[in-house]
Amino acid sequence: MEYKISELVSKSGVPKSTILYYIKEGLLPEAKKLKPNVHRYSESHLELLHYISYMKEHLGSTNEQLKDILQYRDQYFSTSSGMIVPLMNTLSAVPSDTKHYTKAEFIEYFGVEESLLDQLIKDEIILPIDADDFTDKEASIIKLITYFQEAGIAYDILKMYVFHAKALSLLEHQMQEKLCGLRNEKNFSTLWKIVFETLFNAKTYIFNRHTYKAYFSVLKKEVLK
């Protein structure tokens, strides 16, 4: 199906000026040109506008990030692992303006014992994005470990977090594979929303609510004693 620009604006909720800007910036493909001043837009344009709006509103994606993603959209969205590519920066939890350190710089700047750092990496509690790429995110975990040490207790709970995080990541990958197997042109919009909402909304909601319920149950029993 083809749309006039007015119809595309109506169906997408995106202003005409923004649509034309996206085309100019390479986020959207050029429209089909029927006559000098007559253009038609496809279902692909509508789908991409929904995708761009979602990524901006829910994940805070910038135009540059989206441009990098969308120029390879056919490759990225053709496999189960490729569906997750647009989320990689968000999943890494490393803001674009974060300062990065080599391992040597990290040890010196934060005063970390190399033996402790190596052990935490081995235990997979510290997971630098690359072998020689550390940030203050890793430093915050080191700080937490020092609290465990000051209290004279082992950080076994963090090891259990690692164990369950691995199991959960495997479950999420299986979900992606299943969704990819169901993918077609009509349902793709729904499928990537399932992936994104599961990873960034449902997971946090379920985990936090269960933690709340567990603590609330304990508190309730203590009050009733």
Image (cartoon, rainbow, N blue to C red):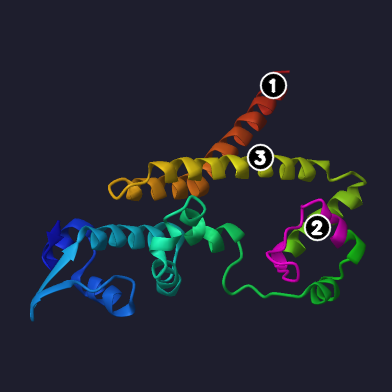
Question: Residue extending furthest top?
Answer: 225
Marks 1 and 3 sit apart, C-alpha to C-alpha, by: 32 Å
- The C terminus lies in which quarter of the figure? top right
Chain part drawn in magenta: 117-137
Residue 113 visible in the snapshot? no
Q: Position of residue 152 (x, y in %)?
A: 93, 46
Q: Residues within 10 Å of mark 1 (few under 14, many from 20)?
A: few
Marks 3 and 2 sit apart, C-alpha to C-alpha, by: 18 Å
Nearer the N terminus, badge 1 or badge 3?
Answer: 3
Residue 110 visible in the snapshot? yes
Task: Give the residue drawn at x 46%, y 50%.
Answer: 196
Task: Give the residue drawn at x 36%, y 57%.
Answer: 54
User: For this view, does 37 lie left or right of residue 83?
Assistant: left
Q: Nearer the viewer, mark 2 or mark 1?
A: 2
User: For this view, does 185 lie left or right of residue 15?
Assistant: right
**Kind of residue indicated by mark 2:** Ile
Q: Name the residue under label 2.
A: 121
**Kind of residue indicated by mark 1:** Lys
Q: Name the residue under label 1.
A: 221
Residue 137 sits in quarter: bottom right
**Kind of residue indicated by mark 3:** Ala
Task: Give the residue drawn at x 43%, y 46%.
Answer: 180
Query: Which label sits on residue 103?
Result: none
Q: Position of residue 12 (x, y in %)?
A: 22, 59
Q: Is the magenta stretch mostly helix, strand or loop?
A: loop
Q: Name the residue under label 3.
A: 167
